Image: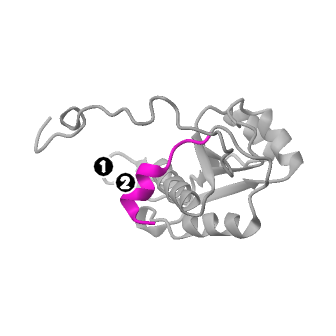
Amino acid sequence: MEYFELIKKRYSVRKFTDEPVKQEEIDRILEASHIAPTGCNAQPQRILVMNTPEAIEKLQKCTRAHFGAKTAMLICYNKDECWTRRKYDGEQSGMVDASIVTTHMMLAAEDIGVGTTWVMHFDPFAMREEFNIPENIIPVALLVMGYPAPDATPHEFHSQFRPMDETVKYNSF
């Protein structure tokens, strides 16, 4: 699929079929995560794949925003492995790295017909407890995914955009 066609077509799917995502498609999405760029190529991302009924039941204890998906992936980063902007403010690249990885996964999923929703509405403390996530692993994004239901539609705000001159400035704010 042509890139701009892909990014225009993609929307947050909130209604899925009952068919589980095929393993080869999970692998393809994970391949996209693996080749995503990260700060100094440190690759601090850690991804938890949830695709068993038991894992999805645990997930449902951590968020209401699962939309009945049979597969989900929690994208995290290892704070001990991030590139750090030491010379200036000590900021770590982990949140950005995990977001880049999540975006690659989301677009790869769309390209192969798997719908996703990027969920931030989850309890990270519950995630830690339910899935035994160590303290150095920081949850960032949850991708719930599956095959879009025939009547799935984009949210009413999906195609509403602010004027470009409100979001883009040249040379100075």
Is 71 drawn above or below residue 153 in the view shown? below
Q: Residues within 10 Å of mark 1 (few under 14, many from 20)?
A: few
Residue 87 seen in the figure: yes
Is 46 drawn above or below residue 95 in the view shown? below
Q: Position of residue 60 (x, y in %)?
A: 79, 35
**Which amino acid, by three-letter code, is at mark 1?**
Tyr
Q: Position of residue 54 (x, y in %)?
A: 89, 46
Q: Which residue is mark 2?
A: 85
**Which amino acid, by three-letter code, is at mark 2?**
Arg
Q: Does residue 144 appear left or right of residue 77 in this picture?
A: right
Q: Which residues are magenta?
A: 1-13
Do residues under tags 1 and 2 come within 8 Å of each other at their CB atoms? yes
Q: Does residue 65 appear left or right of residue 84 in this picture?
A: right
As helix, strand or loop, the secondary structure at mark 1 comes to loop
Whole-number angstrom distance, CA of label 1 to CA of label 2: 6 Å
**Residue 24's quadrant in the figure?**
bottom right
Q: Residue at x 51, y 70 (%)?
A: 35
Is 20 drawn above or below residue 168 in the view shown? below
Q: Residue at x 72, y 29 (%)?
A: 64
Q: Nearer the viewer, residue 36 or 52?
A: 52
Q: Position of residue 25 (x, y in %)?
A: 68, 66
Q: Residue at x 37, y 54 (%)?
A: 86
Residue 88 is tagged as 1
**Residue 122 within the magenta-colored segment of the rendering:** no
Residue 140 seen in the figure: no
